[in-house]
Image (cartoon, rainbow, N blue to C red):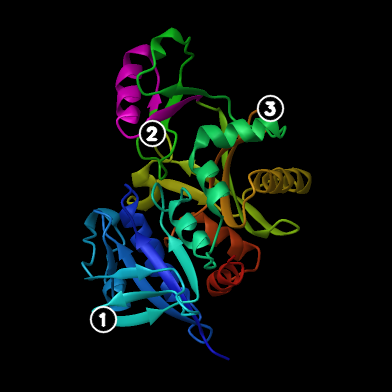
Amino acid sequence: MDKKRVLFLIGGRSGEHEISLISGKNILAALDRKLFEPILVIIQKNGEMTFAEESELQKLPKNPKEIKTPKGIPISLRPYSLKGAQPSILVNSEVHEFDVAFPVLHGPGGEDGTIQGLFELAQIPVVGCGVKASAICMDKGMTKHLCIQAGLPVIPFKEIHRGEKWEKFPWDFPLFVKPASLGSSLGVSKVKSQSELEKAIKEALSMDEKILVEPAISGRELEIALLGKRGELVASPVGEIKPCAEFYSYDAKYVDPDGAELILPAPLSSEDLKKFQEIAKNIFNALDCRGMARIDFFRTEKGEFLLNEVNTIPGFTSISMYPKLLQLAGISYSDLITKLIQLAH
């Protein structure tokens, strides 16, 4: 059987560039080489696409703040088939054909439907969610608006657009201020008083044209991994995060090994677990997701499960919850990557 040639795209222009490199490194290390042949493309921070040897990626340190992106060789991407030819990349006049694209790009420019649109337009199978679901889930406000319309529970929120007079709203503290379309807790602030609010809003609006303001929920922070498609969907056991600081920040996620306690699986009754998994599946389907998603919730002191956000290209670092949760469901890291590629559409 011929190996399927997989084009991996990592890096990107977003603030999660380094996390994408680490995710890509781990995915390639778990790839079943009997089934797949990888082609690695690193999107530099300036947007340039470059071909890189896998050996360069394996040298990267674990700490994202210590990473220097491998430069690679500039490429031409030729996604359109000409006279039945395979889609390919051109590296120094050498053609590398591929069968499927696997974007491992976190944040804007990769997780928001843009790269998915390129491949869908060219009728090339792509791993993960399509254009519509990727674009919707990238925008936390839009995600919640649609979930509310579907009768699904979400954390209450207010949206503020750049240039809007936010002072007119009444505020109850403590609360969280966050960019609508960034991940990895970039630009997120916990605000305890009116005096802290203006700085937090200005910081978030400097990163995104729209931001969300949400109450600080007193309760448990829970995450669940989903794999598959409508009608054939696997929902993992639940994980719980107990941040050691005010909240689950970028450093707690990726830099400080003691930044948070991860409880796998989270202690839930069988009834609550079933309810939680059903809500997560309904959210996945309501947003027209496919392939993969990690869905983050808070459980209130009253026992409500409230949606926080949906991640359509979750992290694949050594401490990331998505692969860990599916391992609890009996799916190994290598089998997970195989299943994701097989689900490409």
Task: Tell me the SS state at disc 1.
Answer: loop
Q: Which of the numbered marks, if any, corresponds to residue 188? A: 2
Tell me what residue is drawn at x 68 percent, y 27 percent.
Answer: 302
**Disc 1 marks which residue?**
93
For the residues marked 3 and 2, what is the alpha-carbon distance in whole angstroms?
26 Å
Amino acid identity at mark 3: Lys
Mark 1 or 3: in front is 1
Seen in the picture, residue 114 relative to 182 is either above or below; the reply is below
Give the mark, 3 or 2, whose residue is nearer the N terminus.
2
Q: x%, y% of residue 245?
A: 39, 37
Taking the image as shown, residue 27 lies to the left or right of residue 345, namely left
Q: x%, y% of residue 309?
A: 54, 40
Amino acid identity at mark 1: Ser
User: Which of the two residues, 98 or 194, is positioned nearer the viewer here?
Assistant: 98
**Disc 3 marks which residue?**
302
Q: The C terminus appears in which quarter of the rendering?
A: bottom right
Residue 303: tell me if it is visible. no
Seen in the picture, residue 77 relative to 147 is either above or below; the reply is below
Give the mark, 2 or 1, whose residue is nearer the N terminus.
1
Toward the bottom, the furthest residue is 1
Q: Which region is colored magenta?
A: 190-215
Q: Number of numbered discs present? A: 3
